[in-house]
Each structure stands twice: as structure tokens, then as C-alpha cells.
Amino acid sequence: MVKENEVSEKLEWRINFPDRKSKVLVPESGILDKTWAGLKGLLGRFTSMVLKFLENAWNLGVAEPKKVIHGVKVGLTLFLVSLFYYMKPLYDGLGGNAMWAIMTVVVVFESNVGATLYKCFNRVIGTFLAGSLALGVQWIACKSGESFEPIVIGVSVFFLASAATFSRFIPSVKTHFDYGTMIFILTFSLVSVSGYREDEVFQLGHQRLSTIAIGTSLCIIITIIVYPIWSGTELHLLIFRNLGKLADSLEGCVTEYFEEGKTVPESEKDGSKRILQGYKCVLNSKGTEESMAKLAIWEPGHDRFNFRHPWKQYLKVGAAMRNCAYCVEALNSSVNSKNQAPEHLKKHLRDACMALSSCSSYVLKELALTVENTTKSSKIDFLVGEMNFSVQELQDALKSVPNSVTEPTVLSTLEAPINEANREPKTTIPLIMEFLPLATLVSLLIEIAARIEEIANAVDHLAGLAKFKLAMDEKANQKKPIEEPTSNAQDDEM
Amino acid sequence: MVKENEVSEKLEWRINFPDRKSKVLVPESGILDKTWAGLKGLLGRFTSMVLKFLENAWNLGVAEPKKVIHGVKVGLTLFLVSLFYYMKPLYDGLGGNAMWAIMTVVVVFESNVGATLYKCFNRVIGTFLAGSLALGVQWIACKSGESFEPIVIGVSVFFLASAATFSRFIPSVKTHFDYGTMIFILTFSLVSVSGYREDEVFQLGHQRLSTIAIGTSLCIIITIIVYPIWSGTELHLLIFRNLGKLADSLEGCVTEYFEEGKTVPESEKDGSKRILQGYKCVLNSKGTEESMAKLAIWEPGHDRFNFRHPWKQYLKVGAAMRNCAYCVEALNSSVNSKNQAPEHLKKHLRDACMALSSCSSYVLKELALTVENTTKSSKIDFLVGEMNFSVQELQDALKSVPNSVTEPTVLSTLEAPINEANREPKTTIPLIMEFLPLATLVSLLIEIAARIEEIANAVDHLAGLAKFKLAMDEKANQKKPIEEPTSNAQDDEM
């Protein structure tokens, strides 16, 4: 019995405290094992981090191949510039200064043509101005005697650098010459300070300018010839895609509200949710639009755009869209609120609301087409008119609400006598409370229609400034019906 | 008579055609005059442009002296760095490479501490990594024979530059290492390519690293010691100021709607309009918030903030605020719409709406104080509860609308029998139509209250993460009343 007890105790001990046993054992087997395990863990985590990073990079590359292409373009340009080092005749001409060409390429080559041109222009002008000024200061410093030379130069560097740095905050400088001002400070300091020691300032300046010229011209050639990415085109794409997204999101939102009962297949749920959230792209694209418009003005004529394409007007279209998107956001939240209107009220206004939302969304889609094809639409005035007519119809439908609403409410009280105690409130009081979310939806829809008209005005102004032509299919249609030409002539005037 | 005629003709001619005469005379007096006039005009326009620019600069400097101070700081740092050139012992140590220190200062010195530290860190790490890698590649190239050397280097520059340029688009790299990656490409290309010609690559690398070290440490010291501008503090200021602006704008908007008749003195009109538009600051500050939060994480502990202050949570507070501002925007437009509710309806809901808006605005102001003082508020739960109670009261007020509304409408029809023809519509139909703008206002106010609660949650989460202490005055109050400690204890748990 004793033995059996012992055995069972041992078994129990083994069974109950295996953790403690192993815990005690590990330190005995040495710190090395522990360190090894820790290292293996670290290595594993590091490897998984690297793998995750590579996976992200791969996904990004697959999703946006133009970013990969940009990388290859930079690599190619640097390879070409480094040829100046490898080829003896070129090296002898420029010497160690060829490094300025490499620096120029790395610093100046941006992912779109506008940014590259902006930086190239700023770099060349900044270097040239600062170089000339520095030589002037150098000359004055030389004349003022050896002991005063460092003082003159030091003081001029201090004042010019301070003033130029401050000027980078002035809006007009910040928008168009921020980079140039930085290069100005850099070049002025380098040339005036190094001139104190070196006598070959002129040669240095000449070599620097020529290497910068080589670097910038290579960048400009490669960025324009090899798969160019124009920020003007990107802005153009962004604006008309956002117009489309706003249209889909507005229509989807109202449809979802009125067709709540409808079951959406699981496979489409994600897609429809994405469509509903489209307005968020409009809300968040202010910064992108502004930076693209800033860079687009540096680009020469490309695609269907001239050199002086009215890019600033795109910003106004964007602002009008955002103004509209604020309301769509409020609409979306009122649609998703728990406090839902009763069915009979919804049914009463359903058709008018759906008609208005589809008209509004149709106007937005037509505006998207106008921008996309850079052609004037002959239909837009008619569509805006139809939208305003839908607003009128919705208001008419509202006017008939009180009469039609009271009846079903009374009926429902008769049909369901359970709420006997609350009968009085049920027949009169909930009227306004129940109507509240629907009233919000209606007045937001009306406000959205007004804001869409503002977008239409902005796009119309854009079409005027950029001299959009009449759409081709409209021109073809002109010949068929007899009345159309007059209406088109009106559109031309607008 | 003939003579008289001649004289009169001459007179007529002189009187009628003085323009033609002078036009003919000008070319005779020479092109020089014209050019001079043109030049004078150009010069005048140029002078006025320059004066305008200087005026702008002066106004900016007066409005934001910290920008002037930043300019002076950069000038001072450059002056200090240029001492390396002027002082013989320092120059002998570093030679012409002292120019890298100047370049580092110009490129790295940013207007706030976070950005400067971010760039310094990135520059040092990028240079070091790229330099080491370039030396490795150099070694391999040397081993592969003279004819293969340029190929190995060229190919490695091409691939590494391409890959690094592409990696700048990957979000995690873009946020924290964008500048470092650029410096990596620059240094790798410079060192590996120039290594092909120069044998003193090691010395070059060593000198470059030490000059960069001198430049970055000077920048860091000056930026932190002389009137530092912390982007964390700026973000902090932005968030609590925006909270205050949102509160004022919400309250002002509702007050303006219900006290429309009140005449505002001309002197206060501009101010009150500015207050009403305060929500626009919230709508437009997304980009600023994000860039500041990105830079703030590089800053050491300062003011009341530790090194690992939860800056990211500020972004969530900002997002919640923007979410609320969308609704305030819609509210503002519904308040300004032409379609106004009738007086008796407004009067009925006036008190409840004003109470809710002032409660909501009070919650926002308390949240602003919480963030401003980095102290937990013991009142906030109570205030949010009061706001929700106001929502309930507004809903109750709504419930009693139908009864009270019908009476004044009937009364007004009796009092004003001019609209005899429209009597029937006046008593029943306009009920809903007239109520529409007010209904929108009410439901937006209710939605805004819900969104303010989200802001309160975000701020509460921030207070938890940043371990905000209980406010001092609250602690003092704890001793006075007997019940208070328990309520404060609850707040501590939240």
C-alpha cells in the first residue's frame, strides 16, 4: 500500500506539476539555451517583419505599377549620370564635380512631371541667382581688406540666409519657389564661404552650373519620354472619379434607405458598402488636389491639356464637391440612425425622394463625363432643370403628407388595440417625432440638389475657361432632330 | 469770307482732330521716348510688386514673429558653421569637406524641433547605411577585375536606386523614413561611383560622416535651445483651439437662428461671423494635424509631454471633431436657408434647442479645457449626462408640437384674413413644409450631440493613455463637500 501510495504520489506530482519541473530544469541546462531561444525568437520576428514588408511592397507594386516604373526611371537616370564617371573624356571635362549631377538627379527626380519641372526650374534659377550674388559679395569683401573679409561674408550669409528662410513662409514664395529659396541659401552659403579659401570660384561656379544643367536635362528628358506621369492628368482623373463616386454614394445611400427590406447577396455587400462610402474620398482629397494643381501649372501641354490649362478651376470644382459631400455625410448618418420613420410615411415620399436622388446623381454623372471627355454637355442644363423639377415635386409630395399620414396612423391604432393606454399619444403626438428622420433626409436632399447646382456652375466655368468643345455624339445628334440645334446653340452661349 | 472760312476750317480741324495730330507727332519725337515711358511703366509695376511683397512679408512677420525667429536661427547656425572655414585649425582638420556641414544645416534645419530631429536622424542613418553598403559593393567590384568593376557598380546603383525609390511609396517607409531613403540613394550613388576614381573612399566617408555630425548636432542644439517650436505643442494647441472654435461656432449658429431679429452692432458683425465660421478650421486641419503628429513622435519630452506621449490619439480626437464639424456645416447651411420656419414653431422649440446647443457647446469647452490643461475633468460625465438629458427634453418638446402648432396656425388665419383664398392650405398643408427647416435643425442638433459624445470618448481615451491627472481645482473641491469624493472616485475609474 505504501509503495502504491508513493507511486501514485509520484504520478500525481508528475501530473500536477510538470510546469514547475520544467521551469526548474531550464536554468540548469544553461543560459546559452535561453539566449539561443531568445535569439531564435527575435530572428523569427525579424524575418516575419521583413516578409510582411516585402509582401506589402509586392502588393503595392501590383496595385500601382507606375510606382515601380518610377523607381526604374530613377535607377536608369542615375546609371546614365554615373557614366560621366566611367567615361574618361567626360570625366576629364568635369572632374570630381560630376557628383553634383548625381546629387541633382537624386534630389530633383520626382514621381510626376510637374514636380520634376518645378524642382529643376527652381534649382537652376536658385543656383544661378545665388551664385551671382555670392560672387558680388565676394568682390566687395575682397575690396574691404583681408581682416574685414570674413566679417563681410559672415554678416552677409547671416542676413541673407535669415531673410530667405523667412521668405519661405510667405504664401506666394511657398507655393512656387520654396525649393528654389532653399537652393538659393545653400548655393549662396557654399559659394561665398568656400570662395574665401579657393581662388577658382568662377570655375567652380561654371562647373556647378553645367553639372546641374546635365542633371536637370537628363531628369526632364527621362521623366517626359519614359512613361510620363503628369500631375495635371492625375488631378483631372481625381476630379472626375470623385464626381462619379459622389454620384454613386448619393444614389446608393437613398436607395438603401428606401429599400431596406431588400436582401443583398453576401458577395455584393462589400462592394455596395464601398460605393456608399465613396463620398469619403471627396472629403479627404483636398490636400492631394491642391498639391497636384500647384505642380500642374509647371507642365507643358500634354494629353488634351494646353500649357495654360485652368488647373486652379479644378480646385474650385473640388471645393464645390466637398461642400456637397459634407451634406452627403450628414445624409448617410441620418439614413443609418436607429430612429427610423414609419413605413407608411416612407412609402408616401419614396418615389419623390428616389426620383430626386437619381436626378441629382445623374447630373453628377453627366458632370463627370463632361470633365472626363473635356467636352461640353448639351444635356446638362436640361438635367439640372429636371433636378430642380424633382425638388419641386418632392416639396409637393410633402405638402400632401399631413392628410395622408393621419389616416394610416389612426388605422394602425385600430388594428393594434394593445397600446390602449397610449392611444392618445399614438394618434397625434408621434406624428412629428416619427417624421423627424425623414424630414432631415428630405431637406438634406434638397440642400444637396442646391449644392450640385454649384458644382455644375463650377464645371461650366471650367468648360468656358478651358474652351471645351461640344461632345462628338451631340454634334452627330444635331443633324437628326430639327429642334436640337437651337438648344445646342444655347449651350454654346452658356 | 474765304479767309474767314479758311480760318474756321483750320480751327475746326485743330479742335476736332487733336488726337490724330498728337498721334502723328509722337513717332516723330522718337522711339526712345516711347521705350522710356514703357520702361518707366514696367519699373513702376515692378516697384509696386516689390513693395506689395515687402508689405506682405512685414505683416506676416508681425502676425507670427516665430517665423522671423526661425529665419534668424537658420542664419545664426549657418554663421556658426561657416566659422569652420574661417578658423584655420578647424579648416585644416576638415578641409573642403566642411561644405557638407553647410549643406546639412541648410537642408536639415526645419521650423520645428520634430522635423529637424526627423531629418537629422534620417540623414545620419541613411548616410551611414548607404556608405557601408557602398564600401561593400566597392570591395566586390574590386575583386571582380578591372573590366567588370564599372558593370558591377553601375548595375548595383541601378537596382538599389530603383528599389529604394520604389520603397519610398510604401506607407511605413513614407511616414518615417522618406528623407532617409533619399539620402541613402544619394550617398550610395556618390560613394560607390566616386570610389571608382578616388582611392581615399574611407577617408572621404569618415570626413563626410563627421561633417554631417557637426552640422546635425549644431542644428539640434540651436533648434532646441533658442526659442524652440515643438510640433507636439503646436498639435496640442491646434486641437484644443479647434475644440473651442467648434463650440463657439455651434452655439453661435443656433443663437443666430433663434435670435434673428436682434440687431448686432456693426462693430461686432465681423467678429461674430468669424466665430460662426470657426468650424471651417476644423474641416481644413486634417493635413496639418497628420504632419504634426508624424513629426511629434521624434521629439523628446518637453513642456508637459513625455517622449512617448500618445500623439496618434490626438489624430483620433481630430477625426471625431471633423466628423462633428460636417454636421455643424450642414446645420449652418440649414440655418442660413431662405426657407424659414414660422415664428410660433420657432418659439415652441426655442428653449429646448438653445438649451441643447449650449449644453453641447459646454461639453466641447470642457473637453478643450481638459486637453489644454492635460488634466482629467471630473465634470465631463455630468456635462455629457446633461447634454443627453437636453436631447431628451428636445424630443419631449417635439412630441408636444402638433397640439400647440395647430392652434397658432388657426389663430393666424383668423387674425389675417387677407389670405382668404389660401385658407385651406394654410391650416393643414403648410404644417410639414413649414416644419421642415426646423426639423432638420433639430435632428442635426441631436446628431451633433451624439458625435460630441464620440469626441468626449476620444478625449477620455487620450486622458487615459497620457495619464492625465485630476484637475487641481477639482482636488481642492474634494475636501469641501462630502458627496463629491465619491463622484470623483468614479471619474478616476473612467
Image (cartoon, coloured by chain):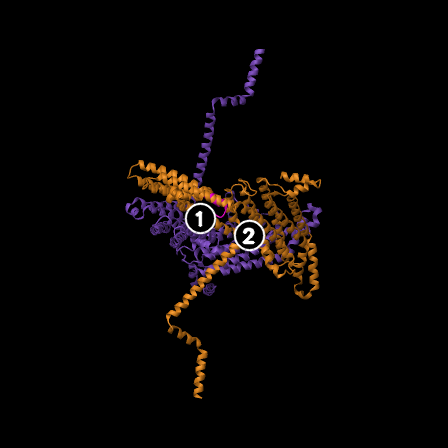
Chain colours: A orange, B purple
Q: Nearer the viewer, residue B389 or B216?
A: B216
In the image, taking residue A166 as reference, residue A487 lies left or right, namely right
Q: CA distance from mark 2 to mark 1?
A: 39 Å
Specify start and end residues of the magenta stretch as a single range.
A105-119
Q: Nearer the viewer, residue B294 or A103?
A: A103
Q: Are marks 2 and 1 on the same chain?
A: yes
Element under disc 1:
helix
Q: Does residue B328 appear in this view?
A: no
**Placement of B377 over or under B335, stated as above or below:** below
- Whether the magenta-drawn stretch holds residue A251 is answered as no
Q: Does residue A278 appear in this view?
A: yes
- Nearer to us of marks 2 and 1 is 1
Q: Main secondary structure of the magenta part?
A: helix
Marking on residue A281:
2
Q: Earlier in the sequence, mark 2 or mark 1?
A: 1
- Amino acid found under the numbered disc labelled 2: Cys
Residue name at image x 66 percent, y 65 percent: A421
Image quadrant occupied by the N terminus of chain B: top right
User: Callout 2: residue from which chain?
Assistant: A
- Amino acid found under the numbered disc labelled 1: Phe
Q: Residue furthest bottom?
A: A1
Picture coordinates of residue A206 (x, y %)? 39, 39
In the image, taking residue A486 as reference, residue A130 lies left or right, namely left
Q: Which residue is mark 1?
A: A79
Element under disc 2:
helix
Picture coordinates of residue B323 (x, y %)? 53, 54
Picture coordinates of residue A3 (x, y %)? 43, 87
